[in-house]
Image (tube, helix red, strand yellow):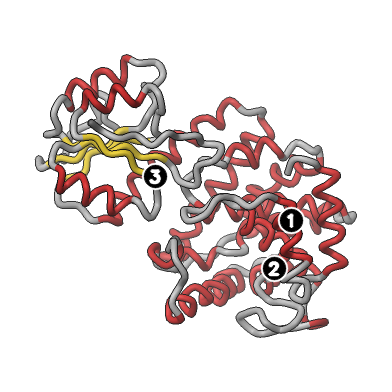
Amino acid sequence: MGRMARFDPRHSRKVLVAVVDGNAEHRAQLAGALTSFYQVAEFAHGGEALDELGQAPPCLLVVDEQAPAADHLFRQLRSDTQLADIPVICTTRRDPSGRAPQDGIDAFLEKPYRRSLLLKTISSLVNKSVEAGWEKLPELQRCALRKTVEVFNSISDLIERGEPLHFEVLADACRPLVQAVAHNDYRTILGSVRDHDNYSYVHSLRVGTLLSLFGYTIGLRGDDLLQLGCGGLVHDIGKMAIPHEVLNKPGKLTAQEWTVMQSHVKGSIRFLRASALPRSVVTIAAQHHEKLNGSGYPFGLKGRQLNELARMASIVDVFSALTDRRVYKEPMAPQHALDIMTGPMGEELDQNLLALFRGMLLEAAGV
């Protein structure tokens, strides 16, 4: 029999991917390639998969074309209203060139394929499904999500081509987000990215949203508040150059991997300065990993050397990192995160600003 993990998206830390392949060795290899990033359910037969899918629908299916009852599975998926929208990847030994999506198949992967291509295809299809749901949102929230994900995704292409990110483009993307914060209509935005598969985008959007809320709470308005939101959205863009296996490693990073990870800050600085973005935006990216006691990176700044906006950004970044869903951990409860930030991290963060941040969260109840 196949085995399907009972899936509750409120508690799962990984998107659930169901794999259907009649070859036990191939099935195990595929599952092994995915388990660092996703929950995986394995099935040897299309019929077995159908029996379980209705009870715990996955976010995506990877089906080998030669799996028993694969054709039946493809047909049944699209005739079942509960399963019809689940993205499906078909693995095949035939050249898929020119084969349009058909019979419930959204993408083809020709064997042998690179693990990186498999992960990229899964992420793209999961995100497409999540982003389609944004169309049902009110205009302001829909616009905030659409524009921020578009500009965020465009940055990697700009970096590759050696082109700058124009502030007008970034500001236009972040303006609806800041407006939503000012109108206390941001919770839907945060909830709508919960199942998005681009962690860097989700984390950056959360930082941009909470940082804007923080700024609004302490009285920032207009361009000052907009620049704060922009800084939050692009504070980690240097991570686009970090290898996937380092960025999403479930276990502890080696000393060499940690050096690679830390390099993302200077990568952000180079790109943002070359783009001639406002100083506040660059400062947020440059200093959000610095600590008051000098234990941060990349420059080991401390005390008065740290800009106030960067102190705010550091608080929001730490809180978001602790309460984010990751491939290797469940999200931490907000109160637990705040306890860590006032306790073990007490000498690293500005406690006066943190008290304001805590009060903001209590008033916003539910963030």
The amino acid type of the residue labelled 3 equals Gln
SS under mark 3: strand
Q: Distance between the residues labelled 3 and 2?
A: 34 Å
Q: Mark 3 points at which residue?
A: 39
Q: Which residue lies furthest to the right in this view?
A: 219
Of labels 1 and 2, earlier in sequence is: 1
Which dot marks residue 211?
Answer: 1
Give the quarter of the figure containing the C terminus: top right
* Circle 2 SS class: helix
Identity, as a three-letter code, of the amino acid under mark 2: Ile
One can see residue 332 in this view: yes
Image height check: is 52 above or below 12?
above
* 3 with respect to 281 (left or right): left
Query: Residue 304 at x, y = what percent?
Result: 82, 82
Q: Residue 284 carries which label?
A: 2
Is 187 in front, or is 282? 187
- Structural crowding at the residue carrying mark 2, measured as other residues with C-alpha within 10 Å and reported as few (<14), some (14–19) or many (≥20): many
Give left or right: position of 141 versus 349.
Answer: left
Callout 1 touching callout 2 (CB < 8 Å): yes
The answer to whether 145 appears left or right of 239 in the picture is right
